[in-house]
Image: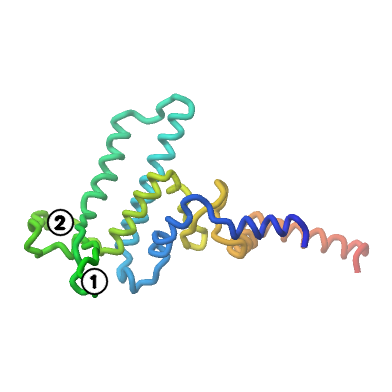
């Protein structure tokens, strides 16, 4: 085993800042249909993640060179769109009577809060009705944003979400990277060129 192999293995096993905090969000985004049967909740959270990532990426670009590529009005509109998505993710802390301990705390989502006497009824009939797992996923999105690592949440070419350890990382594992490369136009062109070279060499008698 050479030093490069040891380095690669240690890099894969190493935990990066924000990686463990991102796991619940990644598990939910990559979950099966039993958690989010229609997929609508995951689509909403994906949209929220992408909107916040774009906002912060553009803001950092503006700060880096001191130039504002977008007008304050455009920035304000983007922030309003994000806030409009976040407003429906309501929750309440509560004591859970189903637990053995009488002091067991839990979180109730907006769907659970409807019809409960200790909270005002929701007047807007058009609002979202997210499940508790979706609300917790949004909590995770906000927490990762505050940590400055939401940009590390990416979607692989295969559709799976993962935590990017490097700025240029596009794939969730090496196998997926190899599969994508083997099916890329560049790789197909290279194979055709190699096949043509071999054919010409064989035809000339230089290769049997």
Residue 187 located left or right of residue 128: right
Q: Quadrant of residue 139?
A: bottom left
Q: Residues within 10 Å of mark 1 (few under 14, many from 20)?
A: few
Label 1 or label 2, whichever lies nearer to me, is: 1
Residue 95 % position (x, y): 19, 65
Q: Quadrant of the N terminus?
A: bottom right
Q: Quadrant of residue 82?
A: top left
Q: Nearer the viewer, residue 79 or 136?
A: 136
Residue ID at (58%, 56%):
14
Q: Nearer the viewer, residue 164 or 94?
A: 94
Residue 21 located left or right of residue 110: right
Residue ID at (91%, 69%):
208
Residue ID at (23%, 46%):
84
Residue 159 % position (x, y): 47, 62
Q: Residues within 10 Å of mark 2 (few under 14, many from 20)?
A: few
Vertical arrangement, residue 2 with respect to residue 87, above or below: below
Q: Nearer the viewer, residue 165 or 182?
A: 165
Residue 132 % position (x, y): 26, 63
| Residue to which mark 1 is pinned | 101
Vertical arrangement, residue 69 with respect to residue 48, above or below: above
Label of residue 126 in the image? 2
Residue furthest right in the image: 205
Q: Nearer the viewer, residue 200 or 150?
A: 150
- Rounded to the nearest angstrom, the CA distance separating label 1 from label 2 is 38 Å
User: Which numbered disc, 1 or 2, marks the residue that appears first in the sequence?
Assistant: 1
Label of residue 58 in the image? none
Q: Secondary structure at mark 1?
A: loop
Residue 122 located left or right of residue 177: left
Residue 69 % position (x, y): 41, 29
Residue 54 located left or right of residue 200: left
């Amino acid at each position: 085993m050479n030093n490069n192999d040891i380095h690669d293995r240690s890099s894969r096993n190493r935990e990066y800042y924000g990686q463990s905090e991102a796991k619940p969000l990644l598990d939910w985004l990559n979950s099966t249909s039993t958690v989010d049967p229609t997929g609508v909740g995951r689509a909403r959270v994906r949209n929220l993640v992408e909107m916040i990532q774009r906002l912060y990426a553009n803001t950092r670009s503006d700060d880096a060179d001191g130039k504002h590529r977008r007008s304050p009005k455009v920035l304000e509109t983007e922030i309003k769109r994000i806030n409009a998505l976040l407003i429906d993710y309501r929750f309440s802390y509560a004591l859970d009577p189903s637990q053995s301990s009488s002091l067991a705390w839990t979180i109730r989502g907006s769907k659970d809060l409807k019809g409960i006497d200790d909270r005002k009824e929701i007047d807007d009939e058009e609002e979202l009705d997210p499940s508790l797992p979706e609300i917790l996923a949004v909590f995770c999105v906000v927490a990762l944003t505050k940590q400055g690592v939401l940009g590390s949440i990416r979607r692989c070419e295969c559709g799976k979400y993962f935590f990017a350890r490097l700025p240029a990382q596009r794939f969730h594992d090496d196998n997926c990277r190899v599969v994508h490369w083997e099916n890329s136009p560049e790789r197909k062109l290279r194979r055709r060129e190699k096949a043509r070279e071999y054919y010409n060499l064989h035809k000339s008698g230089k290769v049997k």
